[in-house]
Image (cartoon, grey):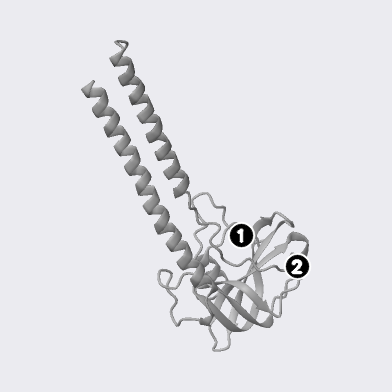
């Protein structure tokens, strides 16, 4: 009975340790999400002189100035409104800088009605979305359709700094455009489910070990 007992205890110990590790990861992830949410909802500040993707991601900022030129359209969809586009425009600030602003979602039928140039105040968050990979199609320049937000490529196309502000609010509002502000809903947090899975396997392993030992004692192992 020694070998089955050692195997059973070792297996349960390993599974319990994996479950506890996932609980520690859960605590870490919840703290991280809370920090991000606090950063997103903080009072807006002026745009940093040289924004950094590591230091300034999700920073709440305020821009005063004007949208300029034809916006870029990023193909997407909305559960309520169907197919449409994210509208990404060049924005010239009051101090002469040019950055990208994700103004929000516009249904396909209203895409041509987005103003190309007008004064505005934008409150939003800095972001460097990672949406492109080797399977992302190249932009369709003839129809002005992009298939992902690529900050570097969009900045080059519009002649701006490689800096993107995702709008929470645009004043005055763009007609037909709904801001799609950053939140934490897209950041996965499955550690509790993983922990439950490991603890459940530990219970099953312990039960199987007990059954094996019972059969050995009865001479049926």
At 27% from the left and 33% from the top, the residue drawn is 10
| Residue 120 locus on image (x, y percent) | 66, 82
Helix, strand or loop at mark 1: loop
In front of the other: 186 or 164: 186
In front of the other: 207 or 96: 207
Placement of the C terminus among the 4 image quadrants: top left
Asked where in the image residue 148 lies, by quadrant, the reply is bottom right
| Residue 121 locus on image (x, y percent) | 63, 82
At 69% from the left and 82% from the top, the residue drawn is 118
Residue at the spot of label 2: 112
| Residue 202 locus on image (x, y percent) | 37, 35
| Vertical relation: 162 (above or below) 46 | above
Residue at the spot of label 1: 146
| Residue 189 locus on image (x, y percent) | 48, 53
Disc number for residue 115: none
Disc 1 packing (10 Å; few <14; some 14–19; many ≥20): many
Taking 23 as reference, is 183 left or right? right
Q: How far apart are the alpha carbons under marks 1 and 2?
A: 15 Å
Asked where in the image residue 31 lies, by quadrant, the reply is bottom left
In front of the other: 144 or 91: 91
Mark with earlier residue (1, 2): 2
Residue 143 visible to an observer of this rendering: no
| Vertical relation: 103 (above or below) 141 | below
At 75% from the left and 67% from the top, the residue drawn is 112
| Vertical relation: 61 (above or below) 107 | below
In front of the other: 53 or 109: 53
Residue 34 visible to an observer of this rendering: yes
């Amino acid at each position: 009975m020694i070998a089955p007992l050692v195997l059973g205890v070792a297996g349960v110990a390993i599974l319990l340790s994996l479950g506890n590790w996932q609980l520690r990861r859960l605590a870490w992830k919840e703290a991280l999400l809370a920090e991000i949410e606090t950063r997103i909802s903080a009072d807006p500040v002026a745009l940093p002189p040289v924004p950094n993707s590591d230091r300034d991601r999700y920073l709440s900022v305020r821009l005063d100035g004007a949208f300029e030129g034809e916006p870029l359209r990023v193909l997407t969809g909305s559960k309520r409104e169907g197919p449409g586009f994210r509208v990404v425009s060049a924005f010239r600030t009051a101090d002469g800088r040019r950055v990208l602003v994700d103004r929000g979602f516009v249904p396909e039928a209203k895409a041509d009605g987005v103003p190309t140039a007008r004064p505005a105040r934008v409150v939003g968050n800095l972001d460097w979305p990672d949406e492109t990979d080797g399977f992302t199609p190249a932009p369709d320049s003839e129809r002005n359709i992009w298939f992902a937000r690529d900050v570097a490529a969009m900045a080059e196309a519009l002649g701006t700094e490689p800096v993107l502000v995702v709008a929470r609010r645009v004043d005055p509002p763009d007609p037909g455009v709904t801001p799609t502000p950053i939140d934490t809903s897209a950041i996965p947090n499955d550690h509790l489910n993983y922990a439950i899975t490991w603890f459940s396997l530990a219970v099953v392993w312990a039960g199987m070990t007990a059954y094996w030992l019972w059969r050995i004692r009865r001479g049926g192992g």
